[in-house]
Image (spheres, rainbow, N blue to C red):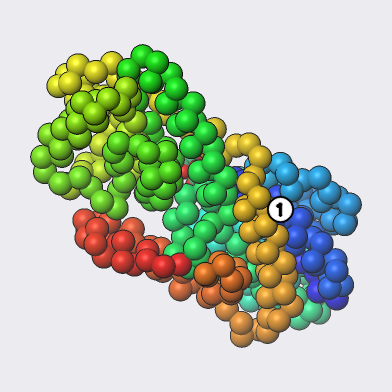
Amino acid sequence: ARVVGVLTSGGDSQGMNSAVRAVVRMGIYVGCKVFVIKEGYQGMVDGGDCIVEATWRSVSNIMQKGGTTIGSARCKDFREREGQLKAALNLVTQSITNLVVIGGDGSLTGANFFREDWPNLLEELVATGKITQAKADECSHLNIAGMVGSIDNDFCGTDMTIGADSALHRIIEAVDCIATTASSHQRCFVMEVMGRHCGYLALVAALTSEADWVFIPEWPPEKGWEDALCNKLSQERALGQRLNIIIIAEGAIDMEGKPITPNDIKDLISDRLKYDTRVTILGHVQRGGSPSAFDRILGCRMGAEAVLALMDATPDTPASVMSLDGNQTVRVPLMECVQRTKAVQSAMDRKDFKKAVKLRGRT
Ligand code: F6P
């Protein structure tokens, strides 16, 4: 029977628990032994109590919880050779040669490097007498299946990352709440949402909450935007609207690549239009709370597929990512997606925003 390990890494997101549960249960269903690795890569490096065999029951009642019950971390040790050797030893000790990683692009890239280096790591463990040659032969290949858990929806290769839908729910609930008080006092609110360098959350939140304006990194406002914004807001007021909502992505920039901050916009509106303007930074509330039905199902579908991908893997199968493509679950080569995701960022760094949007494109 194959032995599977599952971990969550990087920033948490709603729906990760559902993915872990599906990996454990599908794994057990197809006859695997499944270990959960707590605290992300840090737990893999530390071993001991962090690597625990899961049972059908041990993942009950977690699907409805936000965050990740097995813990997550951004781990420095795993970037060093010493940490990787410790992690490899911990996996080999439990005969784990199938790894499911749920995280963002950095976490998935790390998994792929680890897989590529696996033979060298085993060789070194044998040479230093940490494992026998027989053990190294038994564990000679490490199979990797990734799932993208992130609220940002910034990964090329999947229509939706696990957690983005729930984060959107949190955001629009907050906008709806703000809108009532804004209307009472005829105020303007500038609301900052997360997403790192990706404007997905901001754009969809703006469209679904009838915001007056949105700032996203992929489409910096053109020169003279200050006038256009003020005209738009005053037009809305002239038509009888009692409030204004402006959504700004945390990564918003201008044409020169300079950050645009919520306070820049607040100052502009208060100075020019004299509207009572407030800033609300939603922050980590967006990553919290109960996962939406969409994210629970997404986690289940991806988790089950990840186990099947590992069962099908041969030594030549490259690491893959479970992704959603037109509502179908598909497996895509991990490094292809990571490279495309990186290409988007470098197009943005070059201020070639059209190219960035095209590259991000469908899936
Ligand atoms: O990647 C998810 C995310 O929530 C981003 O939207 C945000 O920029 C970042 O993580 C915040 O990171 P941290 O939780 O380390 O403050």
Locate residue 315: give its quadrant.
Answer: bottom right
Residue at 15 percent across and 32 percent down: it is 231
Q: Position of residue 250 (x, y in %)?
A: 37, 39
Q: Position of residue 55 (x, y in %)?
A: 88, 56
Disc 1: which residue: 18
Element type at marker 1? Answer: helix
Q: Is residue 158 above or below residue 20?
A: below
Dot 1 amino acid type: Ser
Quarter containing the N terminus: bottom right
Residue at 68 percent across and 69 percent down: it is 306
Q: Is residue 301 visible?
A: yes
**Closer to the camera in the image, 70 or 188:** 188
Q: Position of residue 362 (x, y in %)?
A: 41, 67
Q: Is residue 107 visible?
A: no
Q: Is residue 287 above or below residue 79?
A: above
**Closer to the camera in the image, 212 or 156:** 212
Residues packed near mark 1 inside 10 Å, few (<14), some (14 to 19) or many (20 plus):
many
**Closer to the camera in the image, 173 or 63:** 173
Q: Position of residue 184 (x, y in %)?
A: 40, 15
| Direction from residue 285 to residue 297 in the image, left or right | right
